[in-house]
Image (cartoon, rainbow, N blue to C red):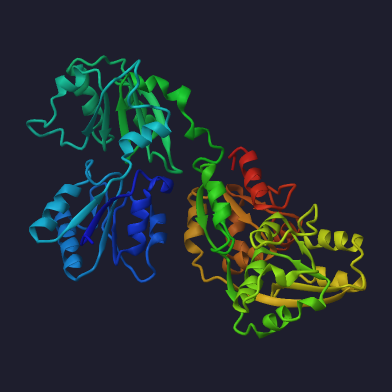
Amino acid sequence: MPNVYLIGAGPGDPGLLTVKAKHVLETADVLIYDYLANKSFLDYRRPDAEVIYVGKKGGDHTLPQGDINKLLVAKAKEGKVVARLKGGDPYVFGRGAEEAEELLEEGLTFEVIPGVTSAVAAPAYAGIPITHRKFASSVSFITGHEDPTKDESAHNWPALAQAASTLVFFMGVKNLADISRRLIDGGRSPETPAALVRWGTTCHHRSMVSTLAEIPAEAKRQGFKAPSLLVVGEVVQLHDKLNWFEKRPLLGKGVVVTRSREQASDLVRQLSDMGACTWEFPTIDVVPLADTSPVREAVGRLDCYDWLVFTSVNGVKYFWHEMAAMEKDARALAGLKVAAIGPATAQALAERGIRADFVPDKYIAESVVEGLLALQIGGKKVLIPRAREAREVLPEELSRAGAQVEVLPVYETKLAAQDPDEIVAAIEEGEINYLTFTSSSTVDNFFQMVPAARIAPLRDKLKIACIGPITAATLEKHGFKPDIQPESYTIPALAKALADSGGKA
């Protein structure tokens, strides 16, 4: 294996990381990453991997390039496999070649894993193809980071100005007025379409279109700052027609997800697909029981029950874990009727070979009770695998109807350890627009970590979304009413309700 992998992390959208890059991140001993590399990539690392940040932002260098080179050499000479994660592509204005040369001089080996460069991806997300048969058959990538006061430029400005190429300038905002002037002086028409794309492909993505002459003033008026790409050329005319990414309903909106980390992925993915900037703030940790012998005992006598009622995906997961440990599978449920509180729980059962006999129209315990009573559950033996602490509506009402109910804890939930200061500060600064709750316990735990008195003064900056009426009722106990509540009590419906709000938070 190479001592060091020089990895292109792409422009920011985590979905644009290559499969090979992900594999290396999962196996490397050391991960050294840049400012522009999406921090979500850190989730791919080995739990015991060493992680070192060496980012450079607006002249503020955590480590100078020379020290980064020495760090790569030192870690590789320790016998460790090093993943060097760089924004975009390592060899496109990324100084990856300098790092590779240093490694070779020290007798070390390396491999380059190319990344999607922002010069291609950011304009594409803004509706600007950098080549087009009608407008441009070539493209030039240019650094815009030159010192405008130096005697000679490395660029042949007349050649750039007079070519028919699309021009893509990296890091060009600081010198935007100088770039504009030099191109116009070199012969480029002041009316040439020009665009800026900031934080391209990320949830903070923004773009603007102007002309080569006017874009410096327009950029200042609209507050465009680094990191932004400058695109100059006739292809910019297609921006409004082909701009697909900026139509996402939650683009740029900050959304807090309070579900447990292991359950948050579906909601985070759906919100991210709508353009949201998701903030994971798990209020619950789902953990296995210390003693699972009661679960195994119940599994050993499943033939004693008539109904098996699952109230969550976690209930299915942890019940099946003990089934598997006892070398049992779906055949152990032969003869039982099975109920699921909602479609996600039903899907978890289906993945294990069980088709739910009953799923209510509304996904709350009260509707499960109503539906099971209609199925003549009175007098039947019912097993409910669930969390140790949960609402008692279901077992109490079924027992009242004459069912013989046994509640079987198969997992437990605990208050997650979180520092709320970052979330509160982000709300104060306008970075967070939505707060989402998917269960009563997420509400109670959130306000145990973040006192309601800290949220109340910020209420006009924040919309609160609850998955259903039970969660909303718990929220009201803390002094707040939800702004958003879907008609169907599911994660997809919750995400859609946020999108339907029009991103107007």
Q: Name above or below for residue 123 compared with residue 478.
A: above
Residue 212 sits in quarter? top left
244 lies left or right of 288: left
Residue 121 sits in quarter? top left
- Measuring from the top left, give residue 19's x and y in whole percent: 38, 51
- Residue 271 visible? The answer is yes
Q: Which residue is drawn at 51% across and 42% down?
A: 275
280 lies left or right of 325: left
Q: How many labels, in total?
A: 0
Q: Name above or below for residue 397 compared with residue 426.
A: below
Front residue (pair 138, 286)? 138
Front residue (pair 366, 302)? 302
Q: Residue at x 61, y 54 (%)?
A: 436
Q: Residue at x 16, y 68 (%)?
A: 77
39 lies left or right of 187: right
Q: Name above or below for residue 459 compared with residue 345.
A: above
Quarter of the figure that contains the C terminus: top right
- Residue 433 visible? The answer is no
- Measuring from the top left, give residue 101's x and y in whole percent: 12, 52
Residue 285 sits in quarter? bottom right
